[in-house]
Image (cartoon, rainbow, N blue to C red):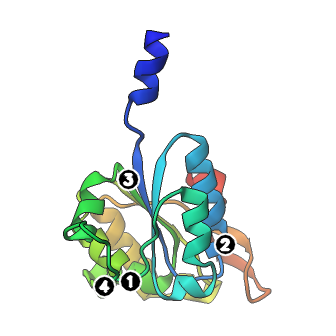
Amino acid sequence: SNAMSAESKAPQPHVVLVVSGGIAAYKACDIVRRFRDLSVDVHVAMTRAATQFVTPTTFAALSGNRVVASLFEDLGSEVIPHVRWAERAALVCVAPATANFIAKMAHGIADDFPSTLLLAASGPVLVAPAMEDDMYRQPAVQRNLELLSERGVQVVGPGCGALASGRHGPGRMSEPGEII
């Protein structure tokens, strides 16, 4: 029983899930659930566009933690929250990673909470691209993914399949189980 109580007091791994604004944002709900099933403490940072697909309230309920969707939210006593979140994260996972957000990451643009957090992150980063096939095939998107890979960012997917437009091709976000 002492081993059990010591085990239950061990700190949970801390993951930041960045949700950018694509239709695949609904799959991020399942990613949060699966992380929680593995006893991972999940904190969700959302782009403003992501809140048009899934509400912060949904992610707060699933994660059990406050969700940040704005760089200027009042986070109470937390000082420089994008830095603190980055420091605590054992992993930052970006899913879905839209073409826009991938470009921000590749070029160091920090104009919202999630992109600022990623500039402060020094640990492992995983991105799961999600976009239409023609967007995914664009040389600029491919080069941005190459830049991220060269910097040690892990890329999972995308898969090939049905897309939001009704088309079929590469760009479909990997399934939550594969991302986990």
Q: Amino acid at mark 3?
A: Leu
Left or right side of 57 for 139: left
* Proximity of marks 4 and 2: CB atoms separated by less than 8 Å: no
Q: Amino acid at mark 1?
A: Ser
Residue identified by numbered label 2:
26
Q: Give the Cα separation between the discs numbered 4 and 2.
A: 25 Å
Q: Position of residue 4 (x, y in %)?
A: 49, 17
Camera-side residue of 75 and 13: 75
Tag 4, which secondary structure?
loop
Whether residue 11 is situated above or below residue 111 in the rendered picture: above
How many other residues sit within 10 Å of disc 2, few (<14), some (14-19) or many (≥20)? some
Residue identified by numbered label 3:
91
How many other residues sit within 10 Å of disc 4, few (<14), some (14-19) or many (≥20)? few
Q: Amino acid at mark 4?
A: Phe
Tag 2, which secondary structure?
helix
Name the residue: 63% across, 83% down: 53
* Proximity of marks 4 and 1: CB atoms separated by less than 8 Å: yes
Label located before the other in sequence (1 or 2):
2
Residue identified by numbered label 4:
72
Is residue 118 among what the camera can see?
A: yes
Name the residue: 80% across, 86% down: 166
The mark closer to the camera, 1 or 2, is: 1
Q: Give the Cα separation between the discs numbered 3 and 2.
A: 20 Å
